[in-house]
Structure formats: C-alpha cells, structure tokens
Image (cartoon, grey):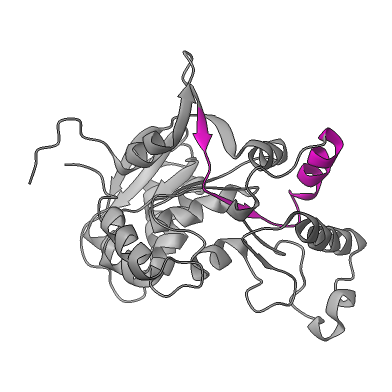
Amino acid sequence: MQETTNPKTLYDKIFDEHVVRTEKDGTSTLYIDRHLVHEVTSAQAFEGLRLAGRKLWRNTSIVATADHNTPTTGWEKGMDGITDPIAHLQVSTLDKNLAENGCAAYFPFLSRGQGVIHVMGPEEGAILPGMTVVCGDSHTSTHGACAAIAFGIGTSEVEHVMATQTLLTKKMKNMLVKVDGKLKPGVFGKDLALAVIGKIGTAAGTGYAIEFAGSAIRELSMEGRMTLCNMAIEAGARCGIVAVDEKTIEYMKGRPLAPEGKQWDHAVEYWKTLHSDE
C-alpha cells in the first residue's frame, strides 16, 4: 500500500473536496451536493428567491418531503386531515413551491415515501457516501452514518444554498470517539450515544465533527449508526460521521436514487476510500 504523505480524517477528505474558495479568515465557500427540504424552513427561502428574481441554481440537488407538521391520524381525510391552519398552509405551500421549481424527488403528504426527512433520505438513496448534505433541521447530522458531511442550517442559509448551491462556513475541528467491544443484547445506538454524552458532556463536541469508530460502531446496523450520528448534536457537535464499510455499501445497493450499472461500480470504488487515514 502506498504511504500516505498527508494523512487526513474522513471529515477533512470530504470537506476539502468540496471547497470552492477559502478566505484569509478561514471562511470557506463549500459546494453542497444534496439539499433536503421540508415544509417548515423552505417557504421563506422560496419567497426570498421570488422577491429577488432568482431561480434555484440546481433543482436536481433538492429532495423534499412533508415532515414536521403532518399528522399521524386522519389520513383518510387527505389534506383536510391537517387541522392546524398554519401546518396546512406550510404543507400546501411546499406542494406549490416544488411544483413551480422542480426537484430531484418529492414525497408529498400521504405519498409512499413521505415521512421523517432524516429517514426518507437514506431509505431512498438520496444520501450517498462522500456527499455534503444540508437541511433546515439541526438533526441533519443523522446522515453522517452514510459517510457524508451532513448538518443543519438556518432559513436564510436554505435560501443561500438554493440560490448558489454553496454555503459559507468554517471548517470544524476533528474529534474521534472510538468504542470497542461487543454490545450486549438490548444495547443499541441510542445507548452508545447516551453513554458517550454522559462521559464527555453535552458541550464537549462544540466546534467539532465527531467521527464514530471502533468495533462496537461497526457492529451497529445502519439505522443504529443514524441514531448515533443524530445524537452527536446532543453532545454539542454540528455533525457526526461514520466511515464506509461493507455494511454501508450493502445498504446503498438498489435504493431508488442510488447509482446503477457502471456508475455503481465507480461509486463503490470511490466509497471504499472514505475512511480516515492511519
């Protein structure tokens, strides 16, 4: 194996591949691959674009669903089942905005793929290893389980990504959380997350991207890893991330938005490089 002369963490590898420009103060213009959109933080962003006379820079980056303000009962009534007037307006506005602007995939209220956006993304293959991913929701860190840099942004930043396909941000510091050993029956991703937070505290991850590694992490299912990365936020971090292994690749295979054929082969070859150097 060729010796690595400039070793990098997984976070550094993905971040550096997406930097468009870095200013003297360390502020980077970061290219965004996937923009997850839901009904709560997108309406003002779409309106801002309209008022400024701008269009989406790359609508194929957007995968959207109705999420936060949809009911779990009353589905037989269709849209009338959303009884809260503000929630109803948000969901119907999302329908209107996506119809007008287009996107890579949209899962409206009551459709087959509609649901929690952090679950929908990986299930549909919208989140792939090596991506930069943003969404107007702090727990976007969930998608770090797919070996992606994923974090939440504010509504003004949602508009900025829509208009430019980039985000102004500063590079985070790196933190490795390594958990070795075999998990006992009934111990899952959330238990690991709570144990780590109990040890390091709820603010220890401030300013950091946390990479979760070790045999106990590799033993987790992809769903368990998603839970762990989701809860990196509760340790104060902005994102969590897990390196690619065979479990990651097997999970991605055959997903609706995942690559196929020769593109799949090329993707897997690249994905296998997505780990921190020794």
Which span is picked out in magenta? 29-52
Q: Is residue 80 toward the left or the right of residue 190 in the image?
A: right
Seen from the viewer's position, the closer of residues 139 and 30 is 30
**Position of 76 relative to 187 (above/below):** below
Seen from the viewer's position, the closer of residues 193 and 175 is 175
Q: Is residue 68 toward the left or the right of residue 58 in the image?
A: right
Q: Residue 46: within the magenta?
A: yes
| Camera sees residue 220 | no
Q: Quadrant of residue 194?
A: bottom left
Residue drawn at x 21%, y 34% as measured from the top left: 7
Residue drawn at x 90%, y 76% as measured from the top left: 80
**x and y percent of residue 209 in the render?**
41, 40
Residue drawn at x 61%, y 60% as measured from the top left: 104
Point out the residue furthest to the top here. Answer: 24
| Camera sees residue 66 | yes
Residue drawn at x 80%, y 44% as measured from the top left: 44
**Position of 243 relative to 78 (above/below):** above
Q: Quadrant of the C terminus?
A: top left
Q: Is residue 226 toward the left or the right of residue 136 in the image?
A: left
**Position of 159 relative to 181 (above/below):** above
Q: Quadrant of residue 260?
A: bottom left
| Number of numbered tags placed on the structure image | 0
**Position of 140 relative to 114 (above/below):** above
Seen from the viewer's position, the closer of residues 253 and 230 is 253
**x and y percent of residue 190 in the render?**
44, 62
**x and y percent of residue 81 in the render?**
86, 77
**x and y percent of residue 38 in the render?**
70, 57
Q: Quadrant of residue 18?
A: top left
